């Protein structure tokens, strides 16, 4: 993981992050023409490494052909975040920021660090996908293609409520939270467990538990799945950092509170909207409506039994369907 | 609300509740033959009063024709509960109990207080419905008809996880909970709000928020709906009482850990299984499977936009469909 020094970075909220940093990882080699770059921002609670399974020789995302930049975001614990900031912006005093700030920072990375003026593709899952829409609107001339996977231009009211209820409130309602100035990360374990259990309940589709799909993933029981998958995923994370990420997701809006239809109509990239059957977070029927709002966008529903969890590559069928869609998009 | 004195009541767990009480309410008049009684137990967090809207002259549940007994259950705050028990069974030390205990207590009420030997119908919504299955198996000869509405013989793994995650853990994970021995009910407000928000997120179907159905119900915003519907519903309740109710629901099993298929095959009542489109708690596809396991049972999916919330009579279409199904069942 590398760090791009943003310097004193002004946020759209009016605050300036002093000596701000953006984490990133690259895979593959930027060619001399600098026209083989793909940007792949990450989802909430994930890190760039969580995306690497989608990149490999022979796959659509082929590092022998493309140069991948996997940028971080503010609040991911490596880039400038509540957990690594000095006063006055430490812990609960981290200033409000948005995905627009992240995309502006990522744009600096792409243009200033690498001298890239055109991206072949920006893709992202879930809140990573929220960033792809921000890119496609804000820097339209730079973006040739977008794959918006298990995501939306703007999260639905239900998804915003999910972010508030299951990512923010398990911590903010805890006396130990102390308005963000908790003693240490470990003291927040109760809220992190609540978050783990709440996400375990709501992210897998209903059939996942009824049909005991955790067996296919190598877990010995439902309890084992909840401990070693969900608790293991969330317990190491910092609540303030997660809250920053969740608030950015809740506020995501590539029109910045303006006319979203007009913003989506302004997209010049070729957009592929990919949704998954039984994804409660970004249901296919909503993805289809999103695609219809974007000029020339395609829509694909992948018939998955894993819904929003498809990002974890739990099924070869899901992986193949996404890979084929990305190959088609890159060939277009 | 009346109280039936159960005396010293032995629970199946081996503990005995001293001077146990079962709350109940009656509507209508028991006829001389004592053959016009209908039993209508309540759901989690509800009280008998919450069911009264389904009963009325001209409706299927007609009090000019039938005698309704609306029994309470242990843990509902009026019947013997953690919140009203003396030591050694006060607060967090309330003994484990099950819906089998409730049904045994309700059977004493029905037979000893009223001398009823046959029930025309037992009906219940959600965890009220769990009790109808317990009745239909345990006291098969007494039960002529059952309407099991938005429920199941045994909750699914997802529904059990929901009960644990969103009814129990918001409280048990709170330091103020103190293993059930909290200072007072008001000190538990943070967990009750978490519970309100978690249930607001998961009980309405996804379309409820997307299509702003709260408008139809007279709320001015999503936030208004969450405050004045969900928080208002849960905030007055006692966490230990709710946990008793949730644990009974999680453990519900009319075969008592035995052969559920055999238990369901032993039902002699005419059973109507009624499920609601977009009910995440008891999905129609699962209700259909349940009905097929019960001799002579009918299955009806009510095409609702309110899912599990249909119990609150939010739509005239839902109300009419349920009323018609109950009328058919009572005529059979």
Image (tube, coloured by chain):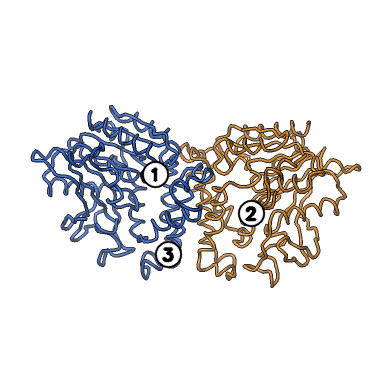
Chain colours: A blue, B orange
The tag on residue B251 is 2
Q: Name the residue at the left extreme.
A: A32
The tag on residue B107 is none
Q: Residue A270 in the image: x percent, y percent?
A: 25, 31
Q: Chain of mark 3?
A: A
Residue at 71% in and 55% down: B73
Which of discs 2 and 1 lies nearer the camera? The answer is: 1
Callout 2–callout 1 Cβ contact below 8 Å: no
Is A192 on the left or on the right of B53, as rendered? left
Q: Chain of mark 2?
A: B
Q: Residue A84 in the image: x percent, y percent?
A: 27, 63
The reply to whether label 2 and label 1 mark residues of one chain is: no
Residue under label 3, please give it. Answer: A189
Q: CA distance from mark 3 to mark 2?
A: 28 Å
Locate the C terminus of chain B and report the quarter of the image it occupies: top right
Q: Residues within 10 Å of mark 1 (few under 14, many from 20)?
A: some
The reply to whether label 3 and label 2 mark residues of one chain is: no
In this picture, is A181 found above or below B147? below
Q: From this viewpoint, is residue A179 visible? A: yes
Q: Earlier in the sequence, mark 1 or mark 3?
A: 3
Locate the N terminus of chain B and report the quarter of the image it occupies: bottom right
Q: Residues within 10 Å of mark 3 (few under 14, many from 20)?
A: many
Is B246 on the left or on the right of A293, as rendered? right
The reply to whether label 1 and label 3 mark residues of one chain is: yes
Q: Chain of mark 1?
A: A
Is A177 on the left or on the right of B65, as rendered? left
Residue under label 1, please give it. Answer: A314
């Amino acid at each position: 993981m590398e760090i791009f020094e943003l310097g004193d970075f002004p946020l759209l909220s009016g605050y300036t992050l002093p000596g701000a940093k953006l984490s990133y990882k690259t895979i593959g080699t930027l060619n001399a023409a600098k026209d083989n770059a793909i940007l792949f921002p990450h989802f909430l609670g994930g890190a760039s490494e969580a995306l690497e399974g989608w990149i490999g020789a022979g796959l659509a995302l082929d590092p022998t052909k493309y140069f991948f930049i996997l940028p971080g975001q503010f609040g991911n614990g490596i880039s400038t975040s509540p957990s690594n900031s000095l006063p006055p912006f430490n812990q609960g005093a981290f200033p409000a920021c948005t995905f627009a700030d992240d995309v502006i920072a990522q744009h600096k990375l792409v243009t200033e660090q690498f001298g890239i003026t055109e991206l072949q593709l920006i893709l992202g899952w879930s809140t990573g996908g929220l960033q792809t829409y921000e890119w496609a609107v804000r820097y339209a001339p730079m973006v040739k293609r977008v794959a918006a996977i298990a995501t939306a231009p703007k999260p639905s009211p239900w998804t915003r409520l999910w972010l508030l209820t299951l990512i923010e409130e398990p911590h903010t309602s805890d006396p130990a939270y102390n308005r963000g100035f908790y003693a240490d990360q470990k003291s927040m374990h109760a809220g992190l467990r609540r978050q783990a259990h709440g996400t375990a309940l709501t992210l897998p589709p209903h059939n996942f538990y009824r049909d005991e799909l955790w067996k296919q993933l190598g877990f010995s029981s439902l309890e084992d799945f909840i401990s070693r998958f969900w608790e293991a995923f969330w317990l190491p994370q910092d609540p303030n950092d997660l809250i920053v990420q969740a608030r950015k997701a809740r506020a995501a809006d590539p029109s910045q509170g303006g006319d979203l239809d007009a913003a989506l109509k302004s997209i010049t990239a070729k957009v592929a909207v990919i949704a998954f059957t039984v994804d409660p977070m970004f249901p296919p029927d909503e993805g289809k409506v999103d695609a219809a709002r974007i000029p020339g966008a395609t829509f694909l529903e992948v018939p998955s039994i894993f819904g929003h969890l498809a990002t974890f590559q739990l099924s070869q069928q899901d992986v193949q369907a996404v890979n084929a869609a990305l190959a088609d998009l890159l060939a277009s």
